[in-house]
Image (cartoon, rainbow, N blue to C red):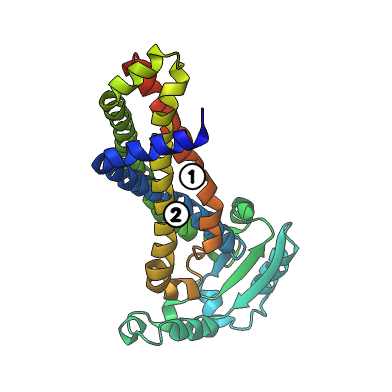
Amino acid sequence: MRFTFLIREVFSGLSRNITMTLAMVITTAISLGIFGGGLLVIDMTNKTQKLYLDNVEVEVFLSDDISTSDPGCVTEICSTLDEDLREFPGVTDVTYISRDDAVAIYRDTFASNPEILDLVRPEALPASFLVRLDDPEQFGAIYDEFALYPGVESVRNQEELVQRLFSVLNGLRNGAFIIATVQGAAALMLIANMVQITAFTRRDEVSIMRLVGATRWYTQLPFLLEAVVAALAGAALAVGGLFLAKNAFVDSMLAEVYQSNIVAPITNAAIVSISPLLIGLAAVLSAATGYLTLRLYVRE
């Protein structure tokens, strides 16, 4: 098959059904854009998880009598707890925070919110130990060992708070994938319709070519390529839309969140890394849908 003839036939078919072509490009772009957004949320979640887990600490809160009577952690109960925490397998660092230190940290954290400052009395903030682990999964061992230790009021793992954030991010990701699936199904149906309509409008031409000896593959390849070209245009539009949304809107909306290290930022590199997948999906799914449509509905 001559290459120039093939290219001419492909673009002729796309321009002949311009409305259908535009609908497929736009629908493909939306579905792939949403799917790509879900992949970016996964990447952000994984990076955020690493960011938090690298800094997760176990908090060992002391009882009120220890917090009140031993601000320097010099009594036998407090100093023994300190030593045992430091010697526990997997512990890399232990920091003692007195009640006065806890009050200072609380006031510094909420300095711009006087209403919140007035809600908590200093007596409500206990002294504590912040325990850094080389493996955050060791929290269970720390809890089992020290939860009932003399002078210990409670043991809390910051990872529980982190998991709540991840559940929100995972919900956003799942929602994006559900919407992308619905949009993707619509795009595939548009591909099938476009191939059928194109083949129908050119049935006389195809019949003549078959009469003079053209193979089935020779006559149907332009239809397949039309579907692939339209889908690739949608994929390119989706990738461009992700870059535009990220740089023009997302970065400015989440600037303070990024600066506070609440979540890891979405980067241009992440979009570049998922672009081949989006383009490959567009090419493979459009080609497969077009081929199946021709085999099932076109008999010339």
Q: Quadrant of residue 232?
A: top left
Compared to residue 298, the image places residue 84 above or below, namely: below
Left or right, 162 with reference to 250? right
Q: Quadrant of the C terminus?
A: top left
Q: Are marks 1 and 2 in contact (CB under 8 Å)?
A: yes
Q: Position of residue 239 (x, y in %)?
A: 44, 54
Q: Quadrant of residue 8?
A: top left
Q: Residue at x 30, y 32 (%)?
A: 194
10 Å neighbourhood of mark 1: few (<14), some, or many (≥20)?
Answer: some
Q: Residue at x 51, y 80 (%)?
A: 102
**What mark, if any, has residue 279 been given in the picture?**
1
Amino acid type, residue under disc 2 in the picture: Val
Query: Is residue 126 visible to the viewer in this orientation of the structure?
Result: yes
Amino acid type, residue under disc 1 in the picture: Ile
Q: Nearer the viewer, residue 8 or 23?
A: 8
Q: Position of residue 16 (x, y in %)?
A: 28, 38
Residue matched to label 2: 239
Label 2 element class:
helix
**What mark, if any, has residue 58 been given in the picture?**
none
Q: Position of residue 164 (x, y in %)?
A: 43, 56
